[in-house]
Amino acid sequence: MAEPTRIVEQFAETGYLGPVRVLSTGDCARFLRALALRRQPPLDWEKGMAATSRAYYEIATRPEVLDVVAELLGGPVILWGASIQHRAANEVHPWHSDIESSDPESRTVSVWIGLENTTPESSLQVLPYSHRFGVTVQQLRHENGKQRDETSVEDLTVRAWQGRCAPHGGAPSLPSRATACRGTS
């Protein structure tokens, strides 16, 4: 793991951190087997597995995950939500902001872990500095008259900065790959 101060500074500046390897291929396979053996619905909402699944708890409390998240948040953490997103080959996860982390003042971190059949091309994309846009991706889409599946990288970079100051002093950034992110994913 990188130096804690540097991790916090990078996260505060760009809004994401990573990639950070937290699980081996065998760890991922064991996690998926554990979920298959004990199928249970999440509580109340699709991310409710945080409260019902021992397998999710064990992943979330691994030092490789928990130590980084605690460093980013500056203390104890609560696993608020956990879910699996299944994607078919070549299926794209639409651009969005998770509602629970969309407030720029929130003290939240989303952790994305690719479990199987994940490549750099298929992993989560994050938009550097998007936590400084002051609006969610959903609001940007609405402002530009775009539906969820019509949103392009250009919509989220160039148009997001129009009328907004680029706080990092540069041009809009292209998406990056990350495992811990704030705001847009």
Image: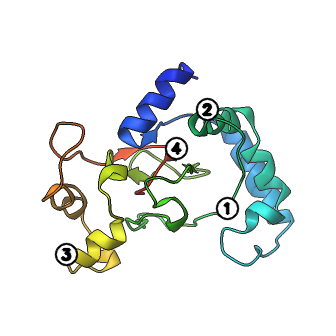
Quarter of the image with the C terminus is bottom left
Classify residue 105 as left or right of residue 135: right
Classify mark 4: helix, strand or loop: loop
Q: In this figure, which residue is indicated by the disc labeled 4? A: 179
Camera-near label (1 vs 2) is 2
Sequence-first tag of 3 and 1: 1
Classify residue 109 as left or right of residue 156: right
Q: Tell me if label 3 and label 1 are in contact, CB under 8 Å.
A: no
Residue appearing at x 32%, y 46% in the figure: 129
Residue 103 in percent (x, y) is at: 46, 60
Sequence-first tag of 1 and 2: 2
Q: Tell me if label 2 and label 3 are in contact, CB under 8 Å.
A: no
Q: Residues within 10 Å of mark 1 (few under 14, many from 20)?
A: some
Q: In this figure, which residue is indicated by the disc labeled 2? A: 71
Camera-near label (2 vs 3) is 2
Quarter of the image with the N terminus is top right
The kind of residue tagged 2 is Glu
Q: Nearer the viewer, residue 28 or 56?
A: 56
Q: In this figure, which residue is indicated by the disc labeled 3? A: 144
User: Disc 2 versus disc 4: distance between alpha carbons?
Assistant: 15 Å
Residue appearing at x 52%, y 44% in the figure: 180
User: Disc 1 versus disc 2: distance between alpha carbons?
Assistant: 19 Å
The kind of residue tagged 3 is Asn
Q: In this figure, which residue is indicated by the disc labeled 1? A: 81
The kind of residue tagged 1 is Gly
Classify mark 2: helix, strand or loop: helix
